[in-house]
Amino acid sequence: MADEDDLILSDLDDGELVSQMHDDLYDGLKEEIEESVNILLERGWTPYRILTEALVSGMKVVGDDFRDGILFVPEVLLAANAMKGGMAILKPLLVETGAPKMGKMVIGTVKGDIHDIGKNLVSMMMEGAGFEVVDLGINNAVEKYLDALKAEDADILGMSALLTTTMPYMKVVIDTMKEQGIRDDYIVLVGGAPLNEEFGRAIGADAYCRDAAVAVETAKQFIARKHNQLAAG
Amino acid sequence: MTNALSKLLETRDWLLADGATGTNLFNMGLASGDAPEMWNEEHPEKIHALYKGAVDAGSDLFLTNSFGGNASRLKLHGAEKRARELSRMSAEIGREVADASGRTVIVAGSVGPTGEIFAPMGTLTHEIAVEMFHEQAEGLKEGGADVLWGETISAPEEYKAAAEAAALAGMPWCGTMSFDTAGRTMMGVTSSAMVEMVGKLKHPPLAFGANCGVGASDLLRTVLGFSALGPETPLIAKGNAGIPKYVDGHIHYDGTPELMADYAVLARDSGATIIGGCCGTMPEHLAKMREALETRPRGERPTLEIIAERLGGYSSASDGTGDAANEPRPDRGRRRRRA
């Protein structure tokens, strides 16, 4: 059986290899992803094309199946880890070649909240989708978020809370952004187990994201909208 | 069967557990981000009041203030070396309250998740998890807990580690998982998978079930999933008092005491023996639940429709059991896995 299943990645043509990479991402096979990324580089693919066609589109399947309840956290973590392996190779090359950027997100749990599994998942999935992520960790005060948004020239602010007692702090952050006249400079996404859409609207966030897959899709939509606006303006 | 919980279960066909710990402590002035376990030492009178609130409202069993009392969680507060001590204190206060109640009240030593992800993706190993839970278990035992009580667990590995730690401490235990992701735990465990896992444990729990999660309806769907498989072990239902809503700058759970009374009776009809609340469940909810369990007759096993009608709709169409569980995963056209 094992012999039959053996597959030499470098023997595949480009189309087959990209499909294989989608499968390997789905199965969380990091080494295979790294090998395939290197093969495509050798074949003259641009880093940006590998990122979008092989990795990001493969992770989209993972994200969709996570959203639809077919995959769960453990599988998604493995897939994200495989993606990360590929990204580690591509990252310096993407910078060198001045490839277009997906967008940058500053993320952290809000002041008083130390629960970070959800936030970590969103970080991994966002990176998996090609976004740059600046993770501020847990227990962030409003100044910390705002300083990082400015210093990193970020597009998106992501705030996470697991406790009903800490979720109102998201409004403090958004209100401060409004006071400083910078609210509309950023896309604000919020998430966390006790939140819901109604809450997201009530505090003035752009969107509430039910899970990490939804966060990625929402971020993509808002970034696309922002680009369109820039193009139109 | 020498432990207090088994004895009580022999004489009663339902028990009322307690409600929320966090929601109550926040109302008493605990600041967000502070470790509730520190209050076992700094404000024992408030922890006393927390337990007494549940007991006075009619709880037969309450959980100690030690949910985050493992080394991994306490480390976030620089108190990782105090897991055993703080857990012991939580049980000592519990013992006092239970013994002063004038009836049999079970002190259940709460053991919450470590908050870490298991290897290979995370850093947690079975050995480390067992060691952490065991340390906490010894503290709870020293403080006089009748049973250990694992709760809000999402990873099967962590549930198994809690079982092993209880065995090492020579303690009976109960354990509930939190089914908050489309009817499964965050790590993908369905109600039926949990029944199967519990059935294989070397040191099985005295009772198992579900706590927290989404709303009261979702939790009962999970309990129906357990009881459909007919496990002999008694079932636990500890659901949230509805869903948190944001009103005028603060959060409150939308489940009224009347709704939780309906929930308690439906939980019993669904097959649960130990029935309590979780987040948002206050003493006034517990009192109504007690009254309902004492005065209302047992009914038929409810359908999902009846539960939705009485308590509200579900957060997802399916909970991953039954027909949905038997559907094969979509064929991904995998050609191979290299040796």
Image: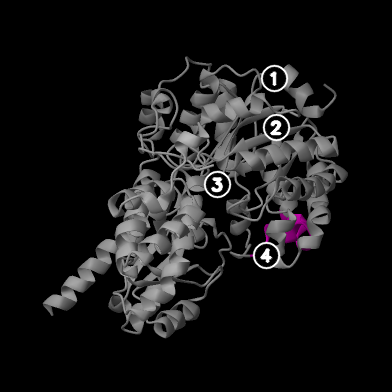
The mark that comes first in sequence, 4 or 3, is: 4
The mark that comes first in sequence, 2 or 4, is: 2
Residue A229's tag is none
Circle 4 sits on which residue? B76
In the rendered structure, the residue with mark 3 lies on which chain?
Answer: B
Q: Would you say A199 lies left or right of B70 here?
A: left
Identify the residue at image location x=30%, y=75%: A99
Asked if labels 4 and 3 share a chain, the reply is yes
Q: Residues under labels 2 and 4: Cα distance?
A: 33 Å
In the rendered structure, the residue with mark 1 lies on which chain?
Answer: B
The mark that comes first in sequence, 2 or 3, is: 2
The type of residue carrying mark 2 is Asp
| Quadrant of residue B75 within the rendered picture | bottom right
Q: Is residue A93 above or below residue A36?
A: below
Q: Residues under labels 1 and 4: Cα distance?
A: 41 Å
Q: Residues under labels 3 and 1: Cα distance?
A: 26 Å
Q: Is residue B259 visible?
A: no
State the SS at label 1: loop
Region rendered in magenta: B34-46
Asked if labels 3 and 1 share a chain, the reply is yes
Circle 3 sits on which residue? B279
Residue sitting at the far right: B142
In magenta stretch: residue B36: yes
| Comparing labels 2 and 4, the label whose residue is closer to the camera | 4
